[in-house]
Amino acid sequence: DTGVSQDPRHKITKRGQNVTFRCDPISEHNRLYWYRQTLGQGPEFLTYFQNEAQLEKSRLLSDRFSAERPKGSFSTLEIQRTEQGDSAMYLCASRTTGTGFYNEQFFGPGTRLTVL
Amino acid sequence: DAKTTQPPSMDCAEGRAANLPCNHSTISGNEYVYWYRQIHSQGPQYIIHGLKNNETNEMASLIITEDRKSSTLILPHATLRDTAVYYCGKGTGNQFYFGTGTSLTVIP
């Protein structure tokens, strides 16, 4: 399967624990995006990378959230000291910046986080 | 994005055209309008996008008003497999903002 993959698909944790999610984009895609989606809402943009550079992170929800893409391939999203309000679906998407101003994003299946 | 509004739900008879409206009154000049759909437990799937002109592809048509403050997604012949949540959004090549979505139910 050459689509975007995310791991784990489900994560249950206790409040105060740290969690890390992984995203593997489509191999030739240089752009990688993270979103959060809560029940009944559309995806909420968090951050994005161009290769290994994080070009926008002001939309990260708090300083407990951080993301990396160390070699310009896979990316991780970490949430420290989780809170019950962090319970949501975390989506990753990737795309190329080839021809054209806009290229479609390809989304992964998401990681569903439940904080008890 | 709170400024991108969509009706929460719509029904459409199978085989008929589904017209899904979206208001994006705060769209800026360099932002595209785009549409994705999401079937339960899957990631969103791209449908179509546009800047100023109407667009058509194999999945749908997109009609954008002249002032660009609203648009309509048209599924010309809805099938049962088109039952999904449809998200309108706006964005540049860098940041994207989704609306709250319309849950479309195609009725046999």
Image (tube, helix red, strand yellow):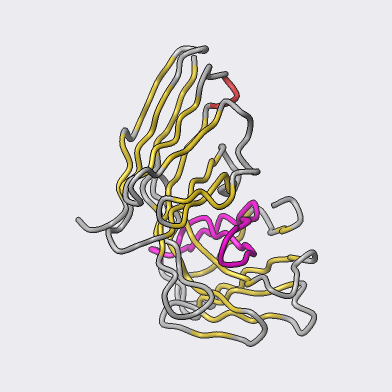
A67 sits to left or right of B73: left
Residues shaded magenta = B80-108
* Quarter occupied by the N terminus of chain A: bottom left
Judging depth in this view, the residue of A87 and B19 nearest the camera is A87
A43 sits to left or right of A19: right
**Extreme-left residue of the structure:** A1
Q: Please say whether residue B89 is one of the residues in the magenta stretch.
A: yes
Q: Residue at x 32, y 50 (%)?
A: A73
Judging depth in this view, the residue of B22 and B26 nearest the camera is B26
Query: Can you give x and y, in whole percent of width and height, for residue A13 in the image?
Result: 42, 17
Q: Quadrant of residue B49?
A: bottom right
Judging depth in this view, the residue of B45 and A106 nearest the camera is A106
Q: Residue at x 40, y 67 (%)?
A: A96
A23 sits to left or right of B4: left
Count of picture labels: 0
Q: Please say whether residue A86 is one of the residues in the magenta stretch.
A: no
Q: Residue at x 64, y 64 (%)?
A: B90
